[in-house]
Image (spheres, rainbow, N blue to C red):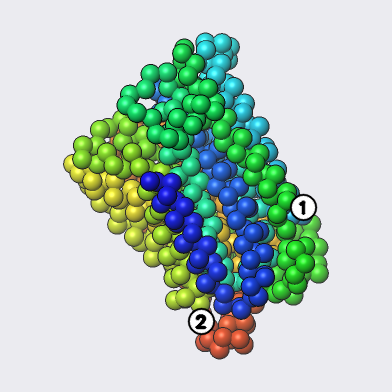
Amino acid sequence: MDLLIVLGCLVVVIWIYFRNNPLNHSPQFMFRRFTNWLPLGMTYAFLYMARYNLNVSKNALGSALSKEDFGLIFGAGTITYGLSFLLNGPLVDKIGGKKGIIIAALGACIANVMMGIVVYLFLHHRLTVNLSLSLAILYAANMFFQSYGAVSIIKVKAYWFHVRERGIFGAIFGTLISFGVYFAFDWGQAIVEASRVHIDGELTGFQQFIRYVFATDTGVVDATWLVFFIPSFLLIVWALIDIWFLSDTPAQASFEDFDTHDASSGEMDKDFTVFELLKRVFTNPVMLTIALIEFTSGVLRNGIYQWYFIFAKEVKQPGAEFFLKHWGILLCVTGIVGGFSAGFISDKLFHSRRGPPAAIFSGFMFILATIMSLTLFTSPIAVGTCAILISLSVIGVHSIMSGTAAADFGGRKATATASGITDGCVYLGSGLQSICLGYLTTQSWAFWPIFLIPFTALGLFFSIRIWKNLPEATRKYLVAVEKVDVTVTSRIKVATTIVTPNQSLN
């Protein structure tokens, strides 16, 4: 049933994509762009499966991996992910998104195979080194390669989608993230259940398939290592599909390139060094503000994804078992709603300004986190509902910021660098919460939602700061083509091009 829901969501997303054509692209272009973003996006979704499978393995391994150990392992990976963008963001701007996503898929594949081997050796009492340390090192390597994925998908998107189309693509980006979370939690948990030596109840068709194909009935120990091996196999499949289908630009697919009216308009003939790319981002106050918003979203996203799954396992939730049982599909569906809501609000209501939807969702999360803190031990239904709605909101913020705003203000020439730095801040925030909550929740779960509340307020504050900002090329397009009055003032001076990052729009 859950799989049918996911397939139904994918059909709806594809339908919305073909219905949303404000620039009147030809049917041939729309179809070719579809065959470009779908394989790219599905690769990214399975990268997510190969990222959050660590959460599923933690519950499967039980006391062998404590909450503090898990927090440190996840923290090591996310901090590595965040810092690696200083290297691979500019690199993907040079080599292109196609090569970047293939590096991500193959690198994460190898790292997951190694983690699976470590778990296999541990469960067979043949591991001669510390389990937590081994997984921390390998998970950090996994996340280093994973970090190529986000910048690659947005790098390709920057050439294929106009600024006025990017809100909806940001929603597609959020949808693919949501699919990945579903694959990680629900498929991952199904793999764990199918790999057990002793099984309670009947197996689903999917679990029977897993047991038959991978011979998981060892008769000795649970084959938990498959939660790492299976995503590795899927990543190889999608990497091969990417090699066949992907094109970095419309011109490479026999279509004409076009001006997307982002911050690189008028600068496409220039070549920038790595230092210049980094300087353009770090001296642009709007990009820095976007990065700060994404830092708060990283705390909130994995503060919910990561810890509700563990909380509901550790603290029984009578009457709310539905949330844990269907955690993956709930995150998937609500993430899709959040992504499309943010894209619609941005493109349709605010003329492609990205600050307003981020502010609206951040304010909503402040209310939800406060309710969650007040009902944590008294209303399991309220806690589960708040957790799901926060996940909806935070995907809305993330998709419109890293998936869209970074590309707008970074421009095509610096898209990977700009989106890499903002997405890196997501995982620096995630690393902070992982380490802090790993310690705090060991003391008491009461600290969990209380820790999240200040970050919702900070996200709201920084989003309001960029409420009125647009790249100069977008502003001119709106005035000249759509006849929109965008004469607004702003407290932040915005980059008008990639060359003059501190120039005012006003």
Q: Nearer the viewer, residue 430 or 15?
A: 15
Q: In this view, does 164 lie to the left or right of 202?
A: right
Disc 1 target residue? 95
Q: In this view, does 267 lie to the left or right of 227?
A: right
Disc 2 target residue? 488
Query: Residue 150's spot in the image, x, y percent?
Result: 60, 51
From what the image shows, is residue 244 above or below residue 345? above
Residue type (three-letter) at the residue carrying disc 1: Ile
Q: In this view, does 390 lie to the left or right of 106?
A: left
Q: Nearer the viewer, residue 45 or 450?
A: 45
Instruction: Quarter of the image for the C terminus: give it.
Output: bottom right
Query: Residue 12's spot in the image, x, y percent?
Result: 46, 62
User: Which residue occupies 38% across, 46% down?
Assistant: 1
User: Which residue occupies 33% across, 24% down?
Assistant: 200
Q: Nearer the viewer, residue 169 or 401?
A: 169
User: Which residue occupies 34% across, 50% down?
Assistant: 388
